Image (cartoon, rainbow, N blue to C red):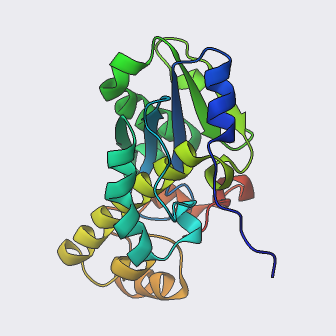
Amino acid sequence: MVPVADPTLATELALHAEGVRYVIGCDEVGRGAIAGPVAVGFCVIDLSVGAHPVGLRDSKLLSEKRREELAPLARQWALHSAVGLATADEVDEIGIIRSLGLAASRALESLAGFLDDCVVLLDGSHNWLTPALASPLDVRTRVKADRDCASVSAASVVAKVHRDRLMIDADARIPGYGWTGNKGYGSSDHYAALDALGPSELHRLTWLHKAVDPAELRESA
């Protein structure tokens, strides 16, 4: 098995060398779930933050326990972090891509002080963020940024832990769907519970009633 390389700050330092003051790592969580919100996380860094936390990686490459340990360290390391949400009802109403933009715009409200001199480093190849912005930002996409770029890895972990905790809390309020384990993703046990119980208020009904574009299911639980 090829070892997974830890993220670095090489991309962020190159942007700082271009004269960019703030680099804002951005990643989404929950895109492929069939229940619960979609979450978009941001972590702001500049040259003052120093080395990122030891062991930081893309959230999908970490155990739940390790993510829980790293999330507060990532928040402390960044100048500021934020997570925005769009609900299952909003995903049903406007679709997943616009919901990602809506969640991002909500998170960016708390980052206003960092947006005048920044680059947003967005994981992936599709710039879904720019169409949702009220004011233009310099958004740069990078495939596997969540794996390779520390600011995006940090955003991934912060967003994942935030959303996971919401799903664990929801499992206590609306039991039977196994959300503590599956976090709203379409596991076999989750589908079995849907067969037995029907959908809940947190399910994305349009995702249950029609085939979903495979491009929308790139994220794993």
Q: In the rendered picture of this protein, how many numbered marks are placed on residues?
A: 0
Along the line of sight, the residue nearer the viewer: 66 or 92: 66
- Please tell me in which quadrant of the rendered image residue 183 appears: bottom left
Along the line of sight, the residue nearer the viewer: 36 or 93: 36
Q: Look at the image and tell me in which quarter the N terminus lies.
A: bottom right
Where residue 64 sits: x, y (%)? 42, 75
Q: Look at the image and tell me in which quarter the C terminus lies.
A: bottom right
Residue at 62% over, 34% down: 12
Q: Residue furthest right?
A: 2
In the image, is 213 to the left or to the right of 208? right
In the image, is 120 to the left or to the right of 78? right
From what the image shows, is residue 63 above or below residue 129? below
Where residue 58 sits: x, y (%)? 57, 59
Q: Residue furthest left?
A: 173
Where residue 104 sits: x, y (%)? 45, 34
From what the image shows, is residue 79 above or below residue 216? above
From what the image shows, is residue 177 above or below residue 92? below
Along the line of sight, the residue nearer the viewer: 25 or 33: 25
Where residue 159 sits: x, y (%)? 42, 52
Along the line of sight, the residue nearer the viewer: 17 or 99: 17
Residue at 39% over, 88% down: 196
Residue at 35% over, 19% down: 112
Any part of residue 87 in sight? no
Any part of residue 14 in sight? yes
